[in-house]
Image (cartoon, rainbow, N blue to C red):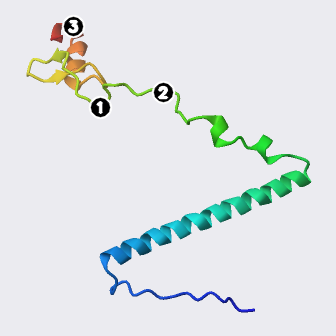
């Protein structure tokens, strides 16, 4: 039997901004509905296969609620991304905050026998 649903061609150029917005919202709602249907069908398929093996799907895959919020294990600093006051000043006015790689001018000074603390501000 042939599919009874007809696909309509929409004249986007003839639609107003409000009509286009309504069409977009309806399309997004339909897409979300189809994604939910596909997800539920896949979960049911997995449950059926797990039951054939004598397993329960819930014991194999923990739910997102049981896992809690995802975290990377590290907290970001409150002052991350902000500028830091310079702690060292070179003989030609160059500065370094003391973070990151040591600048070439300070490396050269240390290589010539001078101490880093001599340039502390």
Disc 2 or 3, which lies upstream in sequence?
2
Disc 1 or 2, which lies upstream in sequence?
2
**Local crowd size for mark 3, using a 10 Å CA cut-off: few (<14), some (14–19), many (≥20):** few
Mark 1 and mark 2 residues within 8 Å of each other at the beta carbon: no
Q: Which mark is on residue 12?
A: none
- In the image, 15 versus 68, the foreground residue is 15
Q: Position of residue 71 (x, y in %)?
A: 53, 33
Q: Residue at x 55, y 87 (%)?
A: 7
48 left or right, relative to 18: right
Identify the residue position indicated by label 2 in the image. Answer: 74
Q: Position of residue 19 (x, y in %)?
A: 37, 77
Q: Is any atom of residue 115 visible in this view?
A: no
- In the image, 98 versus 12, the foreground residue is 12
Q: Residue at x 16, y 22 (%)?
A: 95
**Local crowd size for mark 1, using a 10 Å CA cut-off: few (<14), some (14–19), many (≥20):** few
**Screen quadrant of the C terminus:** top left
Q: Is residue 61 above or below residue 85?
A: below
91 left or right, relative to 67: left
**Screen quadrant of the N terminus:** bottom right
Identify the residue position indicated by label 3 in the image. Answer: 117
The answer to which quarter of the image holds residue 23 is: bottom left
Identify the residue position indicated by label 1 in the image. Answer: 81
Circle 1 — which element?
loop
Disc 3 or 1, which lies upstream in sequence?
1
Q: Is residue 50 above or below residue 5?
A: above
């Amino acid at each position: 039997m042939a599919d009874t649903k007809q696909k309509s061609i929409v004249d986007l150029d003839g639609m107003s901004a409000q009509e286009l917005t309504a069409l977009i919202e309806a399309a997004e709602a339909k897409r979300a509905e189809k994604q939910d249907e596909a997800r539920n069908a896949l979960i049911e398929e997995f449950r059926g296969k797990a039951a054939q093996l004598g397993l329960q799907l819930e014991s194999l895959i923990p739910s997102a609620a049981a896992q809690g919020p995802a975290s990377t294990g590290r907290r970001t600093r409150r002052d991350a991304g902000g500028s830091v006051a310079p702690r060292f000043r070179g003989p030609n006015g160059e500065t370094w905050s003391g973070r990151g790689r040591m600048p070439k001018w300070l490396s050269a000074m240390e290589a010539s026998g001078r101490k880093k603390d001599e340039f502390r501000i």
